[in-house]
Amino acid sequence: MVVSYPLLNRTLVMTKRVSRRWRPRSLLQLVLLAFLVVMLPLGVLMYQAGQALSELSHLADVSARQAVEESRRARVLSNLAVEMERSARQYAVLEQESLLELYAERHAEFTELLAQQRRFLPGNPDVLALEEQLLLLSQLPELEPEALEVWLALFVPFAEHTEAMRRATSQQIDASIEMISARAEAVQSRLWLQTTALVSASLLLILLFSWLIIRPVRQLERRILSIGSGVETNDRDTIQGPAELVQLGDRLDWLSTRLSDLEAQKQQFLRHMSHELKTPLASVREGSALLADGVAGEMTPRQREILTLIDASGSELQRLIEQLLDYNLLQHNQRVTLERVDLATLVKTVLAKHRLALEHKGMRVTAFDGPMEWVVDRTAVGRILDNLVSNAIAYGEDGGDLMIRAHAGRDHLFLDVANTGEPISEQDRPLLFEPFYQGRSRRKGPLKGSGIGLSVAADCARIQSGGLALVEDREFDVCFRLTLPRQAIPLTEEKTEPLVRGISARSEER
């Protein structure tokens, strides 16, 4: 039978439409329907098994009764044949009428039982021979010696045919038993086939309903994961299933839209706030610079001290605003620009930016010597170092130590920024790189931090396929380790010299 592809496609489309239009209105209905449909083949199997067992039981009962009855009849016929011969021989000797009557009764009884036995053994030659002999034995001849001797001689083949009939009855009973056994085996095979088919159908139905229940749950799981990861796709799967799960999918769509709106509002707020804060801050710093240059006249030492505090606070506030801008930028721009960078020079540049703050705090700085080249994103690594150094200045010990060291391995670069001071508590460590999280340690200085410096640093490491972690160190209380993998040289780069031309000139034992 050949089915055209257009007809097959139309059939599949119609089946899908029907399955979409029909569905249980609730999860409870679907579960109950699943149990009902799955139990249906098992119920059919139990019914058929009961019918088969009932049939076998009835057949065995009938066969057993028939076997007992036929065996008893064959045994009675054998006994009657013996009694008939005994009565005939006694009558031939004694010539008593009572013996003749007894013979006639046994003859009539044998005739009746033989007629019943003939129905059990139709067409049996011994039964037919016995019927013919019964006609000859029905009339007793006159008591002449020769005739009587011939008549009595008929009982010998009569007994032989009776015994043969008894054996034929036993064989017929054995055949019936074998037939019942064969019938039982056939029923058993049929039950096994039905059991296999119906149990397989039940398993397929279980798989079908499990899929019908699990499919919308997995769709909801993927939707939740996409919402949580912040990566929304346009080709969303339409939730198909019970009404509760479909309604839950609609709620997730609403939640996703709501979260997207809130994220957009947050980003817009960060952009506007950063812009609005930078404008008056620039005026404040410009005014403080003019006052420091003496444009408004000479200032007393006390006034100059206050002006220095204003300028330092303005610089700190500008740094916080720049962190907010960096955080906002990293949320929308995950691209990296790889280039070969001398990390020692980059570290010196960052330290020069914080020179005044480090001198004011009295921290002793030790950094590795170069050159040490690695393929990185210069801007991202600069942000990481800037945030880690700022964090060390803010939370480090006054007059303490700041150590920056690097080690280039075969496949990874390890860069540590460590400082002395109050260790980070175990409660703060799991949330240390979460945005806007501020731990239990108190920040040293007039301004409070924004709580996004370490988050920005961790994001900058992540977009380079690296990582930033807090590690234990034997010499320093706080040690952050930046791990960056070896990156391929950009295609636009024409240099082919090794990426790492040197290692730290000053190696610290941990």
Image: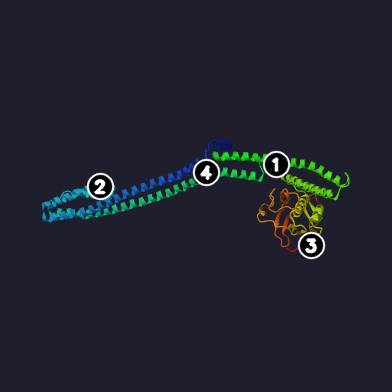
Disc 3 to disc 1, C-alpha distance: 45 Å
Amino acid on which the number 2 mark rests in the picture: Gln
Disc 2 to disc 3, C-alpha distance: 121 Å
Amino acid on which the number 4 mark rests in the picture: Phe
Disc 1 to disc 2, C-alpha distance: 105 Å
Q: How far across and how far down the image is residue 192, in percent?
A: 44, 49
Marks 3,1: beta carbons within 8 A: no
Q: Is residue 224 visible?
A: yes
Question: Which residue lies under the disc numbered 1?
Answer: 266
Between residue 348 and residue 110, name the one nearer to us.
348
Left or right of residue 256, residue 128 in this image: left
User: Local crowd at mark 4 within 10 Å, few (<14), some, or many (≥20)?
Assistant: some
- The first of marks 2 and 3 along the sequence is 2
Question: Which residue lies under the disc numbered 3?
Answer: 506
Question: Which residue lies under the disc numbered 4?
Answer: 209
Q: What secondary structure is marked by label 3?
A: loop
Marks 4,3: beta carbons within 8 A: no
- Which image quarter: residue 426? bottom right
Disc number lying in front (1 or 4): 1
Disc number lying in front (2 or 3): 3
Disc 4 to disc 2, C-alpha distance: 62 Å
Q: What secondary structure is marked by label 2?
A: helix
- The first of marks 1 and 2 along the sequence is 2
